[in-house]
Image (cartoon, grey):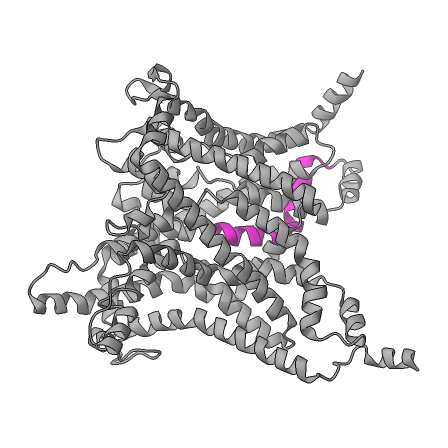
Amino acid sequence: MKKQKIAKQIWRNRQLYLFLLLPVLYIIIFHYVPMGGIVIAFEDYRARKGIWGSEWVGLENFIKFFNSYDCKRIIRNTLILSVYTIAAGFPIPICFALIINSVRSEKFKKVTQTIVTLPHFISVTVMVGILMNVFSNRTGLYGIIGMMLTGEYPADILGSPSAFRHLYVWSGVWQEFGWGSIIYTAALSSVDPEYHEAAQIDGASRLQRIIHIDFPSILPTVVIMLILRMGTVMSIGFEKVYLMQNSLNIEASSIISTYVYNVGLASQGNTDLSYATAIGLFNSVINLIMITVVNKIADKVGETSLW
Amino acid sequence: MSLLAKKSSIGKKPRLGWRDKLFYGICYLIIAVLTLTVLYPILYVVAASLSSASALLSGKVWLWPVDVTFVGYNAILKYKEVWIGYRNTIFYTATGTFINICMTMLCAYPLARKNLYGRKPIMMIFTFTMLFSGGMIPNYILIKNLHMLNSVWSLLLPGAMSVYNMIVARTFIQNNIPGEILESTQIDGCSDTQFFFKMVLPLSKSIIAVLGLWYAVGHWNSYFNAFLYLTDENLYPLQIFLRDILLSSQLSSDIEDPDAIAQMRTVQLVLKYAMIVVSTAPLFAFYPFVQKYFVKGVMIGSVKG
């Protein structure tokens, strides 16, 4: 009886399932098949023999990675870069949103918001291009200013491991803080004005109202955004780091994703796809654990969670 | 009396105390400083692209172009690759966005229907891909085995749909197309397909615009897939050529002849700045007109259904 009912319901919605056919095929082919491809992390993969014909080696690739000279360095670099990015990039949009929300001129608000969100649309390639040109110690603004102040070309910071992280993080902040603040300004716009009116009558200053009304009302959004960010702590994007990487700053700029690329695809004729996949898998698993754990914590502490 | 005072204060801007005045002053100052920090590098790049290299190198260019020339822009016009790149990028953006929208809406609508049997597990199949992925190498092997290396499909199909955007669309449909409309049209004998084309799509115009813009910007700026999967220059999008022009052709400092260096610098340096302007200007010019759609999208995305 119940089965019949379900079958009837499915039959009635048959067109809807037809709609889903293409997207489901897509997700299987382009997302789940590569997940299956992860098995090569446990093999000595040879393209000639294929995924099923290659020799099984168990955890050898992982052991090789954990014992390698680079392992500690790239994990450390990935973590430092990521934590630095969050530490610098997370609070600024919140502060900016709180400040711009308290400004009373709508026109001023609108113009500044347009300007500060613009850099979000600059592509990674162009962004790194701007960095390379503006911070060139010969031809860039940096070099020119250094020349004017000291009479000689300043040190090359594009090829300096210690400067790499600052350049990476702060150019990212420059690019994203305006865009990142949108979600908070949206949350702030839904704060009931009656709270503000009541507080004003009680003689609260604007700053006090920010601390006691505005900030608490966006706190749930802040928590969710922080969860999202923490979950991605080990998944720093490949593109920007790779483009900023050069032989001089490699010590600080070699992170997991660029390392995977260099081991797996870049070195001509000398690639180790299995080894690279193993490193990638190690990274994906950590990401998965991170986002699950962080979500559990937020669920307990803040009564807000992603799912 | 106190009630009266309360009433009259509502709707009027109350007079500011000195603390609030100071506070607003600091607010405006912070915003102004941040806005200028964002604006200045952009203005500098534009000014540099229009200045002569010698003015640039002697530190005369700060905000406005000095010795205005169009050397850089002329050099770009002669760059065959830039035109190929532009052509390809426009193709990838248009076709890719079209595929994205079709897939996203096809997927979002059935999943927005609460009475769809198996909705939860199907949803799980999609959301899990946001948490875990095969990674760079298995993706590469897949594209290779599908014989899509060096074909336009390698840029169009792997990202045919973003699960995040699909969820945004689904939330929108759930919140904006009431179930009553569906019920009443079903009584009139309207099929799901008819309902999708005649009601859902027209009523979802605004979300389609939002997602279309997001997808389009993504295609315009995307670099990674082309970088991994393409080796044929005729298929390269603009971003790949940009990398070659902006980054790879760094001046090597071991050229001895100072005249040669100077010669190379004059064109190359200005060309790079001009290139940045030419590749980014379309997005910047377009953005203020569609800003509200982008902002709207972020807001819909922040409300989970």
Quarter holding the C terminus of chain B?
top right
Is residue B60 shown above or below B190?
below
Residue B51 belongs to magenta span: no
**Of residues A112 and A218, the one drawn nearer to the viewer in this rendering:** A218
- Could you tell me residue A200's position as x and y percent? 77, 75
Q: Residue at x 59, y 80 (%)?
A: B25
Is residue B248 shown above or below B104?
below
| Residue A176 in sight here | yes
Quarter holding the N terminus of chain B?
bottom right
Residue B212 belongs to magenta span: yes
Is residue A52 shown above or below B39?
above
B262 relative to B8 in the view: left or right: left
Extreme residue toward the right, this view: B1
| Residue B198 in sight here | no
Residues in magenta, as a range: B190-216
Q: Main secondary structure of the magenta part?
A: helix
- Could you tell me residue B296's position as x and y percent? 61, 58
**Of residues A10 and A143, the one drawn nearer to the viewer in this rendering:** A143
- How many dots with numbers? 0
Is residue B287 shown above or below A271?
below
**Of residues B60 and B245, the one drawn nearer to the viewer in this rendering:** B60
- Could you tell me residue A37's position as x and y percent? 42, 25
- Could you tell me residue B187's position as x and y percent? 80, 36
